[in-house]
Amino acid sequence: MITNFLHSLLPGSIKRHYLYAVFLLLCLLPVGAQATAIDYLETFIAETQTVRAGFSQTLLDQNANRLQESSGTMLFERPNKFRWTYEEPYQQLIVGDGANVWFYDEDLDQVTVRKLDLALGSSPAALLAGDSEIEDNFKLEELGQQNQLEWLQATPKTSDSAFEFIQLGFSLEGDLEVMLLRDSFGQTTLLVFSKLDKNPSLPTDSFEFTPPESADIIRD
């Protein structure tokens, strides 16, 4: 309809410029706004019930010096179930079963267990595997686009959180790619996710943990 209307108004001598006029008009039409990182996070929470992904983790000191590198796999199921398996350089496991969080260090043969509500709260796991009410625990702020990622910052609302802030980077297609955490000691943990699979079917025992009989158990 727009192109026919323009064509009828143009004299014959300049009808050859008709496509150019259409182009100019289209340039003036409003376009859809680019989704923001908060939009991506809200969609991720609303539409993602389970996740499977690989990750690499780098720990940096206050001066951005590299202290440690590790890697492993991550699973989660909403609400409040998750499993982080560290494979390199040490075998460690963190399991949230919906009631408790279990920290198992295989080399030390030691298990630490905490009540879920105490361990989750304003933690990174609360952002990924918590319920949809994330703004009850975090103040969300847009950081804009950097390196082809849309970034947001989540600042815990409680003063007793172990983290000053958490930053999330989403691809322009809305996939979670990076998580950056600054702890209360000024150290930074960088998590880069790979092969992130949304809503996979996970084994029913994925979030169960039974401490080895030989392990020392510390209840926090």
Image (tube, grey):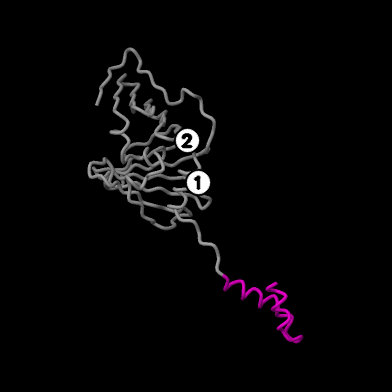
Residue sitting at x 41%, y 23%: 208
**Secondary-structure class at tag 1:** loop
Q: Please state the extent of the stretch shown in magenta in the rendering.
A: 1-29
Q: Is residue 164 above or below residue 10?
A: above
Q: Nearer the viewer, residue 30 or 179?
A: 30
Along the horizontal axis of the image, is 22 left or right of 101? right
**Whether residue 195 is visible:** no
Residue sitting at x 43%, y 45%: 178
The circle drawn on residue 54 is 2
Which quarter of the figure has residue 75?
A: top left
Q: Position of residue 175 (x, y in %)?
A: 50, 46
Along the horizontal axis of the image, is 29 left or right of 187? right
Residue sitting at x 49%, y 56%: 35
Q: Quadrant location of the C terminus?
A: top left
Q: Position of residue 124 (x, y in %)?
A: 36, 40
**Whether residue 142 is visible:** yes
Judge whether residue 139 is colored magenta: no
For the stretch drawn in magenta, the main secondary structure is: helix
Q: Nearer the viewer, residue 138 or 184?
A: 138
Q: Crowding at label 1, few (<14), some or many (≥20) Cα neighbours within 10 Å?
A: some
**Secondary-structure class at tag 2:** strand
The residue that label 1 is drawn on is: 175
- As shown in the figure, which amino acid type bears the numbered disc 1? Asp
Q: Return the residue found at the far right.
A: 12
Which quarter of the figure has residue 70?
A: top left
- As shown in the figure, which amino acid type bears the numbered disc 2? Gly
Residue sitting at x 33%, y 46%: 136
Judge whether residue 13 is colored magenta: yes
**Pointer 1 and pointer 2: residues touching (CB < 8 Å)?**
no
Q: Crowding at label 2, few (<14), some or many (≥20) Cα neighbours within 10 Å?
A: some
